Amino acid sequence: MATFVLAPHSLSPATRLKDAAAVAFIALLLGIPMIGLTTVDSGGALQIATRWPTLFIFVGVAFAGRLVLRYGIDQFKAHQLTRERSSAAMAAAALADSSGRSGGPVLTWIAWAAFGVALTLPMFFADNRYVVDTATTVLIYVMLGWGLNVVVGLAGLLDLGYVAFYAVGAYTYAILGTEFGWGFWQALPVAGAMAALFGVLLGWPTLRLRGDYLAIVTLGFGEIIRVILVNWTELSGGPNGIASIPRPSFFGLELKPPGDDPTFSSFFGIEYSPIHRLIFLYYLILALALLTNLFVSRMRKLPIGRAWEAIREDEIACKAMGINARNVKLSAFAIGAMLGGFAGVFFAARMGFISPESFTFSESAIILAIVVLGGMGSQLGVVLASLVLVLLPELGRDFAEYRMLLFGAAMVLIMVWKPGGILSHREPTLRYAADGEKR
Amino acid sequence: MSAATAPLLSVERLTMRFGGLLAIDDMSLDVAARQITGVIGPNGAGKTTFFNCLTGFYKPTEGSVRLNHPKRGLMRLEALPSHLVAHKAQVVRTFQNIRLFPKMTVLENLMVAQHNTLQHASGFSLAGLFGLAAYRRAEAAAMDKAIGWLQRLDLIDKANTAAGDLPYGMQRRIEIARALCVDPLLLCLDEPAAGLNPRESAELNELLKHLAGDEGIAILLIEHDMSVVMNVSDHICVLNYGRKIAEGTPTHIQQDPNVIKAYLGEDDADEQLHAEARS
């Protein structure tokens, strides 16, 4: 099989040499003025000097480089072809086995393993602030990714301003908390509803837009929200932000040093430690993220979820099936925004201080990158992509100023290796089984 | 009762203008219940534009499209948006260039077609979110309906396959099955036989006759394949340059001089003269 597969891409040595020679010739043409000739300053006058040896080295490198590159590309293509064929064969085999759940068991196993790790992580790193803190950040992005997945992955509406809803959630809680003394749990649903309202507000004028045009408008929307937060000083504190936002409590028990009121540590009779609050925050976002996941997975299997996917696939066909595309799109915007709002509330509560600087376009870009990198619509893919996108810059800290370069290179590599995202497999929302019905 | 004899759909003086282009010019047509009405005409005659006007995708410049709905009474389709034409008036269409939901499975495609019923049963997702029994029953019923059509259209083996991965002829059948899941009163098929092989066309003929005769679904059929149109249609309307040039039974249409002229060109008479001059 291997020789057969290689055939379309394996070229004769003569062809390869000719190809490399052509490249070398172009290199020579370009190189004569750029490398071969140089100006030297001799006694105040510019004179032209030649550098033929350097030029020949340059042309030689181009020749050899082209040979190697060409060979590498061919090998890669041949390898890809083999893989495509074997995956096609696997797909055929999966089809033959009508009850086979392709790709299912391994992914389920990974998901449960990830869940187990997430659940036990603080127990192993109870004295390591850095790990717990970074894991909390990862989970915020996981939750944001799951929220944006509804809009981008399921409904196919490219949203470049998702951070706006994150900001709306965060500021709603910050204002309710500092001005009106609301607690975290009281503010959570209100902030979610507020973000959903903004989702509809954004969705309404963009109903007729798709693709690039929608992306531009959502990008603008994200910026508008940020600019308002910067300039409306009476409401948002402007660039100074809002400080001393109330921390979430554990069923009414504050997580702070022992004082007059019963605190978490005094109630449970344990010694106070600042890490308790970090671990509590970690479990809080874990719970919120898992609820989000449960909610979105469930919605996907409901009529509204299928309608979201149908809108992504073909809006006109949806209308012909009697589906009100406007309502379906608005519901996707609203629910995605609501989940972003919840994440925002948590962010404000965790930081205790927010300012417009936390809600720049680059945040939207990272969240979108998580969804795209993870594989549009894939819940587990979002987790993996969040790990990659948050941990890579962290791991790269040793490389100082090169870390963003590494980060970019890693993203390019992933997109070359898996253009559809890390997990591009789509699990049907329901299945027909010949012996009966099951979901 | 006059309702029994009145046509299901009556199109009156329909005109559709795109800037300077007159796509449909003063067209009138009656579509009877439980019958198959063929709409034929050369390319660019305005057949698909006519469908778009019926199903709310275009707003006609002039004229009216009235549907005699057995439950809801008289409905004016030209004033309804496309999703209400399908949902409330139960006039459902297919597309000339197949429009399935390619990444979703065949079964999911048919479930999406039952969105309104299911969405209602799911209490706008609340009952569905908590998996209440009423919603589960509605979902099972929707599955049964989808599976029923898949079995009758010989698609059941592909129920769990992504619709976009299937061959062309099968995709045409899926689109019809999906439209049937909307419970159409009037089914508008835009070139359902395009790209089908002769055996598949023959099967399509049987299906259309069965739908109109046994299921009582009125069918409006745009088709170029004469073996289908002439075979199944009870009534045929011929369009050319947006105008209705003939109407009647298939045998009547086949002999109509205007139709022959539209399809074979205007030179017939000239050639006859030349032939006579030469002899």
Image: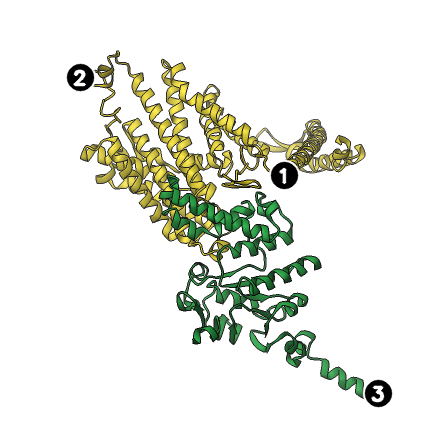
Chain colours: A yellow, B green
Looking at the picture, do discs 1 and 3 lie on one chain? no
Chain of the residue under the numbered disc 1 shown in the image: A
Residue plotted at (39% across, 40% down): B131
Disc 2 element: loop
Q: Is residue A243 above or below residue B170?
A: above
Front tag of 2 and 1: 1
The image position of residue A174, as x and y in percent, is 25, 34
Q: Which mark is residue B279?
A: 3
Q: Dot 2 corresponds to which residue?
A: A259
Please name whichever residue, B238 or A370, is drawn nearer the observer in this view of the structure: B238
Chain of the residue under the numbered disc 3 shown in the image: B
- Check contact, mark 1 vs mark 3: CB within 8 A: no
Q: Dot 1 corresponds to which residue?
A: A95
User: Which corner quadrant holds the N terminus of chain B?
Assistant: bottom left
Chain of the residue under the numbered disc 2 shown in the image: A
Whether residue A181 sits left or right of residue B166 in the image: it is left
Under mark 1, the amino acid is Leu
The image position of residue A208, as x and y in percent, is 43, 54
Disc 1 element: helix
Residue at the outermost top position: A271
Residue plotted at (51% across, 26% down): A109
Under mark 2, the amino acid is Gly
The image position of residue B33, as x and y in percent, is 51, 69
Under mark 3, the amino acid is Ser
Residue at the outermost right position: B279
Tell me if I can see residue A402 in this picture: yes
**Classed neighbour count for the residue bearing mark 2: other residues with Cα under 10 Å, few (<14), some (14–19), many (≥20):** few
